[in-house]
Image (cartoon, rainbow, N blue to C red):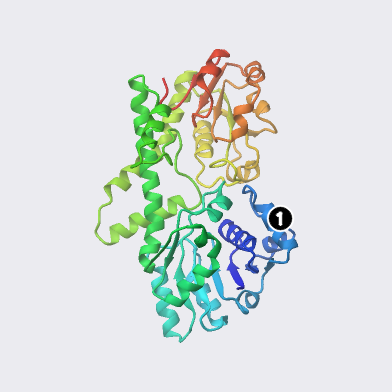
């Protein structure tokens, strides 16, 4: 079975590399010549754990090729994925590709799209007498662990009324199906809505635990222990119950905006979602208040910031709470000394004013009035905190991710400030 992938962003890069890793011949096509040329040399367009190694392994094996020619995408392909990160001109491009395809080719819409998009594409396909089979397959890939999410998904969600198309997709994912990964077959609108509803529910969980973390600070409770106890309840689960985290990433805001807009056009009030979005948006202000309160003022202070990516193991700074925090601290009069293992090039493109980008975490701490953990990179736990204490102007650590051991850090003479921790 030959597969084509249209796109060159994070979604297409992960899908193409991981499908090739299943042993499937894959052609990844996009009109962006510079990016495709770099990918054809084995260079991933962004950092994602394990991704570049998988790309290069499958290129060497001849299973993964990159091209800018749409005819390469359509030629003798059983399945073609539309996998752009943003649905710019998606419907027009999907129809252009469909005209090049053989009959009964499965055209999979994996690009995040508003509810109703696939139904419109199906209608236009039928009106033009094309024989492709349109299937909606939202991808639930989390930056930083996207490769693992693809190889070990919670479920495979297919929106389609076509039995042959569904059978083709099950054959493509046979290794996952044989492993017991559930396959849910539904209609297009349901599949599209599941993606947006999943994002909204994660935002609700994160907002809830952050509000409870605020209460913990007022009653001498520990939000980390509380979240662990809640997560062990089989009705709740621990995922997205980490105090201090906010919901970020390239697709989150657009998906929640899309869901809110859909509800508004249908006259439905999503009060829980709206409240969760407010709490999520205000989390940065709460952290800024913590830092300002600890330092008594932001004006003229120097703050070391560890981590700029929106989460570990990715270079993406899209909707990064850490980068938003840096901007807010600068607005408050602080100067930032920032470090991130891989995300600084992308961060510099987003925000440069008032930020000194450092080569090491120790340089970020040098002369700072406080050190703030903004992204939970695991290596930050193993830093030499004795050295950091000597470098800081004041021995203050603000841990927005609750990833450090407060007992150990305080025993070393630091003032430790966590989220929802006594």
321 sits to left or right of 185: right
Residue 86 in view (yes/no): no
Q: Position of residue 313 (x, y in %)?
A: 60, 43
Q: Is residue 360 left or right of residue 402?
A: right
- Residue 342 picture quarter: top right
The residue that label 1 is drawn on is 43
Quarter of the image with the C terminus in it: top left
Counting every numbered tag in the picture gives 1
Q: Position of residue 258 (x, y in %)?
A: 38, 57
Q: Is residue 215 visible?
A: yes
Q: Which image quarter holds the N terminus? A: bottom right
In the displayed structure, 113 sits above or below 317; it is below
Q: Position of residue 33 (x, y in %)?
A: 68, 65
Where is 404 relative to 251, above or below? Answer: above
Q: Residue at x 60, y 22 (%)?
A: 368
Circle 1: is it few (<14), some (14-19), or many (20+) Cα within 10 Å?
some
Secondary structure state at the residue bearing disc 1: loop
Residue name at image x 51 percent, y 27 percent: 399
Say above or below: 29 vs 400: below
Taking depth in this image into account, of 328 and 65 the one nearest to the observer is 65
237 and 88: which is toward the camera:
237
Q: Is 41 on the left or on the right of 292, as rendered?
A: right
Tell me residue 394's x, y (percent). Answer: 57, 16
State the residue at coordinates (64%, 28%). Answer: 364
């Amino acid at each position: 079975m030959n597969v084509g992938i249209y796109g060159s962003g994070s979604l297409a890069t992960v899908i193409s590399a991981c499908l090739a890793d299943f042993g499937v011949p894959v052609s990844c096509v996009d009109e962006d010549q510079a990016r495709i040329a770099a990918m054809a040399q084995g260079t991933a367009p962004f950092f994602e754990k394990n991704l570049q190694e998988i790309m290069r392994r499958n290129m060497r094996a001849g299973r993964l090729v990159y091209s800018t020619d749409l005819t390469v995408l359509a030629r003798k392909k059983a399945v073609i994925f539309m996998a752009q990160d943003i649905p710019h001109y998606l419907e027009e491009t999907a129809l252009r590709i469909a005209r090049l395809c053989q009959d009964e080719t499965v055209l999979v819409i994996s690009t995040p799209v508003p509810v109703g998009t696939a139904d419109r594409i199906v209608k236009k396909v039928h009106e033009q007498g094309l024989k492709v089979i349109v299937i909606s397959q939202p991808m639930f890939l989390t930056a930083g662990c996207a490769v693992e999410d693809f190889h070990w998904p919670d479920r495979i969600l297919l929106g389609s009324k076509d039995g042959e198309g569904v059978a083709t997709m099950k054959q493509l994912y046979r290794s996952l199906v044989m492993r017991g990964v559930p396959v849910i077959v539904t209609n297009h609108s349901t599949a599209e809505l599941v993606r947006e509803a999943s994002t909204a529910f994660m935002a609700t969980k994160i907002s809830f635990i952050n509000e409870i973390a605020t209460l913990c600070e007022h009653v001498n409770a520990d939000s980390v222990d509380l979240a662990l106890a809640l997560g062990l309840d089989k009705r709740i689960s621990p995922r997205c119950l980490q105090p201090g985290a906010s919901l970020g990433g390239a697709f989150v805001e657009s998906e929640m905006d899309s869901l809110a807009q859909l509800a508004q056009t249908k006259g439905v009030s999503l009060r829980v979602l709206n409240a969760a979005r407010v709490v999520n948006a205000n989390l940065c202000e709460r952290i800024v208040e913590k830092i300002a309160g600890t330092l008594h003022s932001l004006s003229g202070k120097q703050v070391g910031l560890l981590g700029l990516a929106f989460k570990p193991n990715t270079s993406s700074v899209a909707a990064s709470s850490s980068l938003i925090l840096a901007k807010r601290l600068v607005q408050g009069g602080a100067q930032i000394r920032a470090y991130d293992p891989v995300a600084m090039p992308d961060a510099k493109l987003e925000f440069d004013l008032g930020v000194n980008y450092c080569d090491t975490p120790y340089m970020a701490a040098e002369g700072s009035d406080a050190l703030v953990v903004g992204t939970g990179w695991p290596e930050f736990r193993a830093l030499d905190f004795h050295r950091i204490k000597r470098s800081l102007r004041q021995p203050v650590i603000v841990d927005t991710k609750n990833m450090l051991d407060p007992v150990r850090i305080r025993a070393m003479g630091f003032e430790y400030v966590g989220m929802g921790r006594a």
